[in-house]
Amino acid sequence: MPNYRRAFIPGGTWFFTVNLLERHGNDLLVREIDLLRQVVRRVKQKHPFHIDAWVVLPEHMHCIFTLPPGDSDFSLRWRLIKSGFSRALPKTERRSPVRMAASERGIWQRHYWEHAIRDDDDYRRHVDYVHVNPLKHGLVARVKDWPYSTFHRYAKLGIYPLEWCGDPGMEVGGGD
């Protein structure tokens, strides 16, 4: 088993990719978007963080969030988001014998990709990547047409023009 090493930076800003276990043909995250939003709000109330950018796709999501000063526990937040979402769903997913033996649901991949944002340029590239992702995956012809994204907040603030389309081929590492 790999020995995962995570950097814990109090007050840090992080990019994440979080995937469903069964990705092919799965639209659970957009089908249950209201539940996902409710769970994220609940976790934010108890364990604050600032959502810098977020996009929810049918079977995975990317986000950037910033933790409060002195707090480095992003893993707690993800554990609560993933478990809160899972517990609210009926137990209809296929589960492997390993997951059944561990009393685990078969909804999420166990691990997620995280990347500590290093500087302003790194931040900008990752925010762009988050927002261009629906276009990259062929879900829309224009970034503005994907409803489950903070792109609309950025456009309203004038950070992006409404017709921005970014570079669908851009890569930032880890994830998709």
Image (spheres, helix red, strand yellow):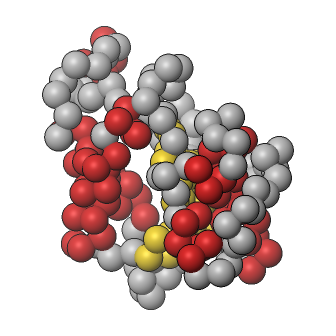
Residue sitting at x 16%, y 28%: 90
Residue 146 is left or right of residue 95, and the answer is: right
Answer with the quarter of the image where residue 88 lies: top left
Residue 76 visible in the picture: no
Return the residue nearer the eye: 73 or 57. Answer: 57
Return the residue nearer the eye: 109 or 145. Answer: 145
Please tell me whether residue 134 is drawn above or below residue 51 in the rendered image: above
Please tell me whether residue 59 is drawn above or below residue 72 in the rendered image: above
Residue sitting at x 65%, y 81%: 158
Q: Position of residue 47 (x, y in %)?
A: 28, 72
Residue 122 visible in the picture: yes
Numbered label tally = 0
Q: Position of residue 154 (x, y in %)?
A: 59, 73
Residue 125 is left or right of residue 104, and the answer is: right
Return the residue nearer the eye: 141 or 32. Answer: 141
Residue sitting at x 25%, y 48%: 35
Residue sitting at x 58%, y 82%: 157
Q: Position of residue 149 (x, y in %)?
A: 52, 57
Return the residue nearer the eye: 26 or 69. Answer: 26
Q: Position of residue 156 (x, y in %)?
A: 56, 76
Residue 81 is left or right of residue 133, and the answer is: left
Residue 172 is left or right of residue 176, and the answer is: right
- Tell me the quadrant of the picture where the C terminus can be found: top right
